Image (cartoon, helix red, strand yellow):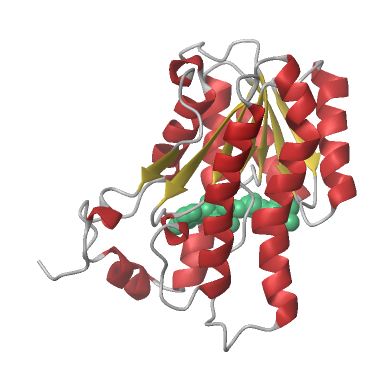
Amino acid sequence: MTGRLNGKVAIVTGGASGIGEATVRRLHADGAAVVVADVRPEAIEALSDALQSDRIIGLRVDMMQTAEIEAMIAATVARCGGLDILVNNAGIGSFGRVTDIDLAHWREVMTIDVEAVMWASRTAMPFLAARQGCIVNVASVAGIAGDYGFAAYNAAKAAVINLTRAMALDHAPQVRVNVVSPGLTRTPLAEGLTGNAEIMAAWTDGLPMGRPAEPAEVAAAIAFLASPDASYINGHNLVVDGGGIAHTGMPN
Ligand code: NAD
């Protein structure tokens, strides 16, 4: 516990699993009260039970629904008296080239991975501005360099990175807005996409660190950007990929 977020109120969307769960744990350990906003109530309950703290507040929210996003911000402010930190982490992965994708799936990815980030930020902005707050978005290295067969995801994460810059310009100095771009991270989402240990091993092969990130390593970067230690950092894309995109792609 560093105490650097004592008295702060944070929301972590998609907070019940993977990078979101690790971020909830880290912000809580740093002293914040944390709203775990997720679409899966049983996963929220499991995390709340594990942490056993009156600074953990579970909220069932479907980030596909703008009304539920608005209710999430309103409930947080009503219960905690304000909002200091919004972590827009909820996201879904997506396989497919443009020639494989159906429009309903494209729209689902764009809604959760981009529109929900915009709508939560828009709704939270006046409350964040009132307390010199900040937003940390979670994009991906796939939004910088692109992965084969992930057309919608690559496009969505690139949009999140530049939306971050737009908001950082438009809402400074009251609100800082930054983004973290993880590389392959050992979470249920990544395990679901890779399917089995063999594919995970193939994806990991060639990473400079020889392994994927642990969720806590990404959470540490998110917590840093959310903290007063990052008070002059705004509009920044912090890549947490163990050096993966430092590589041109030529064999070793
Ligand atoms: P995860 O699947 O482990 O967790 C995502 C959480 O989001 C889940 O708890 C899920 O219930 C929740 N969620 C999904 N749809 C939702 C909705 N409509 N409303 C509310 N909550 C919803 O995933 P993760 O790997 O921890 O991913 C978190 C973020 O990190 C995502 O934005 C993802 O794109 C990004 N990311 C992950 C990796 C990786 O390798 N795992 C790499 C780069 C970026």
Looking at the image, residue 83 sits to the left or right of residue 89; the answer is right
- Residue 120 x/y as whole percent: 75, 41
Q: Residue furthest front?
A: 170
Front-lying residue, 28 or 126? 126
Q: Residue furthest left?
A: 252
Q: Residue furthest bottom?
A: 99
Front-lying residue, 12 or 129? 129
Q: Residue at x 51, y 20 (%)?
A: 227
Looking at the image, residue 191 sits to the left or right of residue 87; the answer is left
Front-lying residue, 131 or 223? 131
Quarter of the image for residue 74 reads: top right
Quarter of the image for residue 113 reads: bottom right
Q: Residue at x 61, y 20 (%)?
A: 173
User: How many numbered marks are there?
Assistant: 0
| Placement of the C terminus among the 4 image quadrants | bottom left
Q: Residue at x 47, y 62 (%)?
A: 190
Quarter of the image for residue 11 reads: top right
- Residue 110 x/y as whole percent: 68, 63
Q: Is residue 94 visible?
A: no
The image shows residue 205, relative to residue 240, as above or below, that is below
The image shows residue 221, relative to residue 33, as above or below, that is below
